[in-house]
């Protein structure tokens, strides 16, 4: 069973890399145990650096990170990391090892010998067919590889899951399916999850709380609902504007009657049309509007 959900606390954490780049600049915040938090922001804003201070892939230049009540610095990194699941883009499965061997590696490092039953359980958890256990990574789809990565990250029942752009290299349908699967795993296992993504729509749809980073600082900290309502400030609003506007355009495509006037059917302004497109104001179409979703998706992979 997983460890009890643990909180993560950042106390005035900064990181200055050799060469003088201040990647993280005095971040203080507490992530409640059991919550699913998304860390969003443009490339280079310090998301990965902040995340890596939790499992000590990065040592802060100043400040402290705690898991529960204990400083992460109190324990040797290899022991700390056994209790923290870590999934990143292009997960880096060992190419010369089977799926089962890849999933079992953390268990073996922790001294377990008989891992077959646990591996079977983990593959089931991430909804991978048991027959895949003996496959080599290069015989898997991108989505399947990421699922193996998630199984490996959860092998030692970590309780805390860190994910850095885990869906970045996947096609949109696979990405959506895997996002939902991760959220379901989070709920079922009572994990504390921190997801780094540059995709605001993904953050809004998966997380309980969204942190927006810019130039090493947290510039917004709000629930998806408050972000969508424009209550989290200008910098967050600029990021929310993109999925909101896309949702609105999809809604227009699916339901021409929401356009003012005679509707899109008679307007020359649709896609590829000659004139400027007619639009209702984005504020009239929140992301969660029923007609805003894309059409039903086929199965993943
Ligand atoms: N190992 C490193 N050495 C020097 N600079 C780095 C290193 N890693 C990241 N940086 C710099 O720190 C800043 C933040 O990087 P990063 O945390 O990777 O941002 P993000 O994940 O938001 O894209 C960037 O300016 C980046 O170039
Ligand atoms: Mg990054």
Image (cartoon, helix red, strand yellow):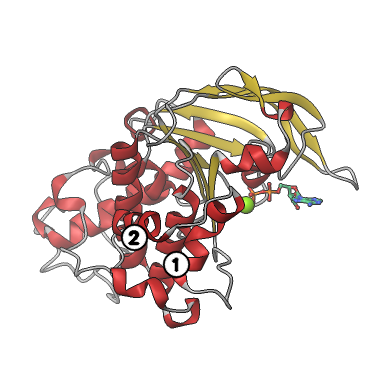
Residue under pointer 2: 120
Task: Using residue 135 as the reference point, say whether residue 266 is left or right of it.
Answer: left
Where residue 140 appears, x then y in whole percent? 41, 77
Residue 196 visible in the displayed image: yes
Looking at the image, is 142 positioned above or below residue 21? below
Label 1 CB, ligand 2: below 8 Å? no
Q: What secondary structure is found at the residue carrying circle 2?
A: helix
Image x and y of residue 283, in percent: 29, 38
Q: Is 233 situated above or below 286? A: above
Q: Residue furthest right?
A: 19
| Residue located 43% across and 63% down the image | 148
Q: Position of residue 206 (x, y in %)?
A: 35, 43
Which of the 4 quarters of the picture holds residue 2?
A: top left
The image position of residue 103, as x and y in percent, is 48, 61
Is there any visible trace of residue 87 in the rendered image?
Answer: no
Dot label at residue 100: 1
Name, please, the residue furthest toward the top. 69
Q: Of residues 280 and 92, which is closer to you in this image?
A: 92
Between residues 220 and 129, which one lies in front from this camera angle?
129
Mark 2, Cα crowd under 10 Å, few <14 / some 14-19 / many 20+, is some
- The answer to whether marks 2 and 1 mark residues whose Cβ atoms lie closer than 8 Å is no
Q: Quadrant of the C terminus?
A: bottom left
Which quadrant holds the N terminus?
top left
Farthest residue toward the bottom? 139
Q: Give me the C-alpha separation between circle 2 and circle 1.
A: 8 Å
* Residue at 30 percent of width and 77 percent of height: 272
Out of 8 and 207, give the one closest to the viewer. Answer: 8
Element carrying mark 1? helix
Ligand 2 is within 8 Å of the C-beta of the residue at disc 2: no
Q: Residue at x 28, y 60 (%)?
A: 127
């Amino acid at each position: 069973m997983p460890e009890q959900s643990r909180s993560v606390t950042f106390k005035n954490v900064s990181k200055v890399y050799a060469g003088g780049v201040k990647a993280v600049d005095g971040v203080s915040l507490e992530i409640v145990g059991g919550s699913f938090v998304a860390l969003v922001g443009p490339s280079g804003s310090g998301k990965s650096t902040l995340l890596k201070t939790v499992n000590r892939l990065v040592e802060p230049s100043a400040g402290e990170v705690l898991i529960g009540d204990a400083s992460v610095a109190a324990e040797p990194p290899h022991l700390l990391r056994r209790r923290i699941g870590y999934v990143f883009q292009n997960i880096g499965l060992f190419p010369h090892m089977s799926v089962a061997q890849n999933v079992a590696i953390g268990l073996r490092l922790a001294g377990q010998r008989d891992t077959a039953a646990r591996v079977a359980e983990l593959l089931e958890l991430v909804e991978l067919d048991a027959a895949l256990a003996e496959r080599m990574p290069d015989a898997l789809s991108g989505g399947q590889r990421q699922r193996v990565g998630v199984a490996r990250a959860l092998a030692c029942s970590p309780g805390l899951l860190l994910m850095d752009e885990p869906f970045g290299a996947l096609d949109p349908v696979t990405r959506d399916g895997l996002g939902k699967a991760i959220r379901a795993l989070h709920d079922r296992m009572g994990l504390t999850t921190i997801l780094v993504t540059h995709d605001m729509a993904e953050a809004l749809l998966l997380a309980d709380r969204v942190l927006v980073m810019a130039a090493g600082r947290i510039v917004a900290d709000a629930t998806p609902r408050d972000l969508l309502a424009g209550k989290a400030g200008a910098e967050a609003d600029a990021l929310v504007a993109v999925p909101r506007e896309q949702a609105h355009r999809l809604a227009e495509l699916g339901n021409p009657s929401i356009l003012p006037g005679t509707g899109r059917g008679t307007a020359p302004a649709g896609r590829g049309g000659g004139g400027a497109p007619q639009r209702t104001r984005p504020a009239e179409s929140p992301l969660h509007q029923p007609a805003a979703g894309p059409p039903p998706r086929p199965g993943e992979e």
